[in-house]
Image (cartoon, grey):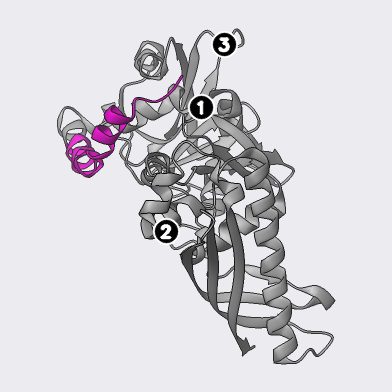
Amino acid sequence: MRINWAKMVGVAGLLGLIVLAAGCSGIDALDSGDLKDVELVTALAVDKSEDESQLIATVQLLNRDKALDRQYAESYYNLAAAGVNLPAAVGELYRFGARQLNFSHASILLLSEQSADCQHWLDYALRSPELRPTIYPVICRANAGELLAAEVEKISQTYLLNNILEPLGSGRPGAAAISLQSFVEDLLQPGIDPVLPLVEQSRQGVELAGLLVFNEAGQAVAALPEEACWGYIWLTRPQHLRGYTLELPQAAVVQVENAIVKAETTALADGCAYVQFQLKLRVRLLNNPAALSEKELQKLTEDRLQQLLEAALSESRHWRLDFLGLGREVYRHQPQLWQAWQEQAYLDKLTVSLSAETEILQS
């Protein structure tokens, strides 16, 4: 099933209005009756039924008397219902005891792999007056509702998920946090295929398991291996890398203070193109047992980033999915060449390289 792009563009254009509507809707909910009738949703999970004929919506609701203890599982309770589609499933929640559900503060839209395709959730997510464009869609390998309800030493899974997505604890998104708005922008733009984080349960509760790439029709197609994931993160999410570490040979470790990536595109005579990524990094040296010189560390950093690029590029060509946005760079800077590439598998027409300028700070 392909997405109606004209319709999607119109809906995406309303994202700004949705932000306002979310705020107004929240106010209306609070003004429409007694506060005791309003239930605050912190996360929405979506699964398929066993026979795959229905979708199951699970909401995680905040216990009011535990509002200051959001890290604990006992601060929440879950409610689930099924319907022929996601709006119907959410509507059925009211038949199972829900009062006035308020989604305006929901931070996570957790999707099982079986319900990850956009046809199951994206239209509702964009049309809902309360789901904010800043909500994080996340794919999980297990049952999404069960993942929300799981406990590890009584710590809330939602709390752990938020720590994965906003690791610095300051409300700033981390490198794996992709908002609904960012996902839709990549889905609608030429020359880039969107990505969402993939999580799974672990002994520690929940952990990032990789990234899942979607095609232009909004279908979840490929889970990236670790090296390709980091290639994607370093080249497309540099503004979110502060605090992340990079392990180098000989046990050297550097931590990102600042990262900027620029891509230069050059059209070649044979109808191909050359894309060069230029990384400007400021990192702090955390470990250097071999007493490597600054020049050696800079060379090792560039070599390691080159490895990540090659891993990501290899996966991109294997799946014919341009999650690095190489085509988008051509579309933006070489429009005539992009026009000539329409309906072509253009990834093999690209030569890609990387250079890094690294400033190393001593701890």
Q: Nearer the viewer, mark 2 or mark 3?
A: 3
Q: Secondary structure at mark 1?
A: loop
Q: Position of residue 288 (x, y in %)?
A: 77, 84
Q: Position of residue 208 (x, y in %)?
A: 64, 47
Q: Are marks 1 and 3 in contact (CB under 8 Å)?
A: no
- Marks 1 and 3 sit apart, C-alpha to C-alpha, by 13 Å
Instruction: Give the secondary structure at mark 2.
Output: loop
Q: Amino acid at mark 2?
A: Gly
| In this picture, residue 224 sits left or right of residue 89 | right
* Amino acid residing under circle 3: Glu
Task: Kindly check if marks 2 and 3 are in contact, taking CB atoms under 8 A apart as contact.
Answer: no
Q: Is residue 234 magenta?
A: no
State the count of labels: 3
Residue plotted at (65% across, 69% down): 245
Instruction: List the residue tagged with mark 2.
Output: 171
The CA span between labels 1 and 2 is 28 Å
Q: Residues within 10 Å of mark 2 (few under 14, many from 20)?
A: few
Q: Position of residue 183 (x, y in %)?
A: 42, 43
Determine which of the numbered discs, if any, sits on residue 52 in the image: 3
- Residue 350, visible in the rendered structure: yes
Answer with left or right where residue 23 lies relative to residue 103. Answer: left
The magenta stretch is: 1-27
- For image coordinates 65% across by 29% down, the residue present is 142
